[in-house]
Amino acid sequence: MAFVDKFLSHYASHNDFSKASRFEVIIYPNFFLSEFFGNVVDLRLQCETAELPGYNFDTVDGRVYGVTYSVAARPAFSDLRLTFICAGDLWEKQLFDSWQEYIMPKTDYLPRYREEYVTDIEVRHYYEVTTSNITGQATVGRPLVGDAKPGISYRAKFIEAFPYTVDPITLSWADDGINRLNVGFKYKNWVSL
């Protein structure tokens, strides 16, 4: 039993277990989004899946004499993929279609300057609020209700992001489920806040 107690104590000292469902995504409005779509912060209510970033290096082979070895050459960031639950009027589809049209109009395929269409996106992960991780509370393990607010366990800001791909939405008479929209973003860099 000592191992089980140590195991539970370890996670209790780190705000219990990390749960995938405790997150929100905030797309900060740039000029275009503010001008034509108002409060895009409401998209955080529709974001069903998101990813916390990873950090990789592209490598090159190094060799002075003998066997080659890998050397870190430059950073490599994976794309940010977000999935949105679609509303009945498909305003999120219209928003991302318009944003992409703004980036590179289909009339002439001449892209705008990057500064005109990029924005920052923040992904926040929260830890579950329990009596064990609220200062001054002694009872362990029961979820709190009322005024308790979850704490942020991790924040990542994707700098100068823009949607480079908006996946198609499949429509079918054989399916009465809720539509989802997958959007891929490229970005310049990300920072942990």
Image (cartoon, helix red, strand yellow):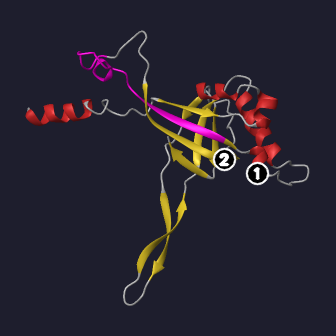
Q: Which residue is mark 1?
A: 114
Q: Tag 2: residue type? A: Glu
The magenta segment is: 120-142
Q: Earlier in the sequence, mark 1 or mark 2?
A: 1
Give the spatial CA distance, label 1 vs label 2. Answer: 9 Å
Measuring from the top left, give residue 7's x and y in whole percent: 19, 35
Q: Nearer the viewer, residue 95 or 121?
A: 121
* Residue 113 visible in this rendered orientation of the protein: yes
Q: Residue 110's image quarter?
A: bottom right
> In the image, residue 29 lies at what x, y percent?
71, 34
Residue 120: % across, % down: 64, 41
| Residue 128: mark | none
1 lies left or right of 23: left
Point out which mark residue 160 bears.
2
- Is 137 contained in the magenta span? yes
Q: Quadrant for residue 83, please give it.
A: top right
**Local SS, label 2:** strand
Q: Quadrant of residue 3?
A: top left
Q: Residue at x 48, y 55 (%)?
A: 55
**Above-or-below relation of 145 to 60:** above
Q: For residue 177, say whether it is visible.
A: no
| Residue extending farthest left | 1
Q: Position of residue 81 (x, y in %)?
A: 58, 44
Residue at 53% across / 38% down in the picture?
50
